[in-house]
Amino acid sequence: MSNYLKYILACILFILGVYLVSGMHFQDALWVYLLLIVLMIFVSIVGHFSMRWNFHLKAFVGNKNETQKIVAITFDDGPNAVFTPDVLSLLEKFEATATFFCIGQNVIRHPELIKEAAEKGHTIANHSFSHSSTIDFNTTKGWLQEIEKTDAAIEKVLGTTPITFRPPYGVTTPALARAIKITKHRVVGWNIRPFDTTLKNKKKLVKRITRQIKPGAIILLHDSHDRIPYILEHLLLFLRENNYKTVSINNMMHDAS
């Protein structure tokens, strides 16, 4: 049973318990029940958007037991013809490793970029095929198409399929959970999210990341905007100055198991 179903069951039992223990008539206690229902809906919404809660499925969001100074840098939404080459150059310059969660459509547009990334030792992972704004409303069948089409696009270029998947926007649903049960992907989240696609101040973004750095952290970035070269270069400088090493998501998960 998922944490979501456990939560719903607990809420129902709690509301029934309040009714039975209070001895109030339903009409007299209506405001209590309405408040509890609103709270239940609020927590449910937060659970959909927080992979750390494992609400609908289990997600790897970092290794809190890690003692060595290692972190995983991840990039979503690529490959991007303009910014992914800059990212790859910086990673090579600092001898750093990263994981790229790629959108299937972009893989088809720029297959040479994921091939280059893989040849340089980086990990290529699945981030859905379309990353559409309404993807969270997908049925199980719709999620399967998104995941499998991206796997096929990556396999066509690299000859292998990814073992990890990151949901667009970090949102999980029961339908996605059912799809993942079929595809067997490991779902990966993060524990450092600087919101680099929305915040514009590059220096503040770097500070938001570096002040949260700790062993076993997973950093969420995007190789799809013009601030990423500055952010990545200063992040890599910070990691080097503080004796941190970068590893792939696959290696971090292996170490955590």
Image (cartoon, rainbow, N blue to C red):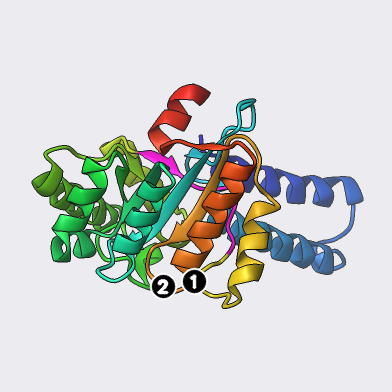
Q: Are marks 1 and 2 in contact (CB under 8 Å)?
A: yes
Mark toward the start of the polypeptide (1 vs 2): 1
Q: Does the stretch in magenta take in 138? A: no
Q: Which residue is mark 2?
A: 225
| Res 245 seen here | yes
Amino acid tagged 1: Thr
Amino acid tagged 2: His
At horizontal 58% and vertical 53% (from top left) the residue drawn is: 50
| Res 53 seen here | no
Q: Is residue 30 left or right of residue 99?
A: right
Locate residue 107: give its quadrant.
bottom left
Residue 25 spot, x, y in % from top left: 85, 61
Helix, strand or loop for the magenta stretch, by majority: loop
At horizontal 27% and vertical 42% (from top left) the residue drawn is: 120
Mark-to-mark CA distance, 1 and 2: 7 Å
Q: Which mark is residue 197?
A: 1
Q: Nearer the viewer, residue 117 or 79?
A: 117
Residue 180 spot, x, y in % from top left: 34, 42
Locate residue 45: give its quadrant.
bottom right
Q: Secondary structure at mark 1?
A: loop
- Tell me the mark number nearer the camera, choosing from 1 and 2: 2
Q: 10 Å neighbourhood of mark 1: few (<14), some, or many (≥20)? A: some
Q: Is residue 44 left or right of residue 107?
A: right
Q: Nearer the viewer, residue 54 or 219?
A: 219
Furthest-bottom residue in view?
A: 200
Q: Does the stretch in magenta take in 193? A: yes
Region in magenta: 186-194
